[in-house]
Amino acid sequence: MLTVLILPIRFPALSLAILNEEDAPMRTVTADNITEVFTGYFGEDTDPRVRDVLTALAQHIHDFVLETRLTHDEWRKGLESLEWAARITDPERNEFVLLSDVMGLSSLVDMVNSVPGATSSSVLGPFHVSNPPPLEIGGDMRRDFEGEVVLVEGIVRDIDGAPVAGAEIDIWQTAPNGMYSSQDPAQDVHSFHALMTTDATDRYAFNTVKPVSYTVPNDGPVGQILDAAGRHPWRPSHLHFIVKAEGCRDLVTEVFAADDPYLDEDTVFGVREDLVMSYTPQPAGSFPDGFTMSGKVPGEYSRVDIDFKLARG
Ligand code: BEZ
Ligand code: FE
């Protein structure tokens, strides 16, 4: 008797089955109804967004298995890849983010959240460092590194064209050897990382050496997936930026060199039309109005103009 009294409170679905055994026989789960059965398990108070996202996810996972007729062996190999990813993921290396990047998931999330008129966002990647060293406008990020010298300069505006003064621009890139500071024992942690604040005229500028194309980490399960798919691990050369300003949405983006051989085949799908810039050769000794070249004065150099348009919000 006690069971009958308690069940309706703790296990409403089960008690319904007991009470209405004849009208509601136990349902067999089949390939045709598994998604419907899945959605039937949601609690009554489930957040509607959680319900929608999980329903769509389950639907796509179920359809994926039905469409590919996934074998046990393939399913097991997939899980083993995820286990390997978990084993090698730590604060320095996130194999799950890399998986999301090479599958195009990170870039699609960027695209569906893009704001028309604003600079496109693009993948963050794993090589950003916290607390980058401040660099004054016009400052030198190349230190003693050899390479093609580039003057990067531009303005930060909102999407209506209003200047954004005091914007913070976090900048990072590879050294000329294709390695980020965290990958290269020969560099200190802050090499090719800088934080610049735009002045009252909304401008920023720095000089550096031209970044180079490089490969994403491919010695883990993601590398194995790329190999199996006959894909290369290369990214076209780029400069990374995070631009933040009061009253504006943070922008995480990258800017690519128009002449890079991997521009049309970035392994993480980060390239957008508005993020491709030309490096234009400049004669020795000529600098744009209001700028000088700090650090070792180069002979010929290139200049790239990168303006950022931030969404308000
Ligand atoms: C990067 O640009 O630093 C990067 C992005 C995605 C995966 C690996 C590296
Ligand atoms: Fe990068």
Image (tube, helix red, strand yellow):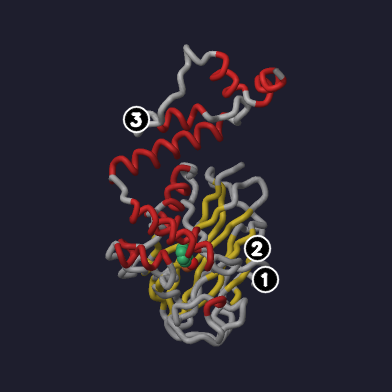
The image quadrant that residue 295 belongs to is: bottom right
Please state the horizontal and vertical placement of residue 125, each as a whole percent of the image.
Answer: 50, 63
- The residue positioned 55% from the left and 69% from the top of the image is 172
Identify the residue at horizontal 56%, vertical 84% (top origin): 185
Look at mark 1 in the image and give the residue it sits on: 134
In the depicted view, which residue is nearer to us: 38 or 30?
A: 30
The number of numbered badges drawn on the structure is 3
Q: Is residue 306 visible?
A: no
Q: Reading the chain from its start, which is encountered first: label 3 or label 2?
A: 3
Image position, residue 305 (x, y; %): 46, 64
Of badges 3 and 1, nearer the viewer stands: 3
Residue type at numbered disc 3:
Asp
Q: Which label was assigned to residue 32? A: 3
180 versus 6 height, above or below: below
Quarter of the image with the C terminus in it = top right
Q: Nearer the viewer, residue 259 or 17?
A: 17
At x 31%, y 48%, the residue is 70
Label 1 is placed on what type of residue?
Pro
The residues bearing labels 2 and 1 have C-alpha atoms spaced at a distance of 8 Å
Q: Which amino acid does label 2 sit on?
A: Thr
Q: Position of residue 95 (x, y in %)?
A: 49, 63
Q: Is residue 176 something one can see in this rendering?
A: yes
Give neighbour class at mark 1: few <14, some 14-19, many 20+ (Cα, 10 Å): some
* C-alpha distance separating marks 3 and 2: 57 Å
Provide the residue designation for mark 2: 197
Q: Is mark 2 within 8 Å of ligand 2?
A: no
**Mark toward the viewer: 3 or 2:** 3
Q: Pointer 2 and pointer 1: residues touching (CB < 8 Å)?
A: yes
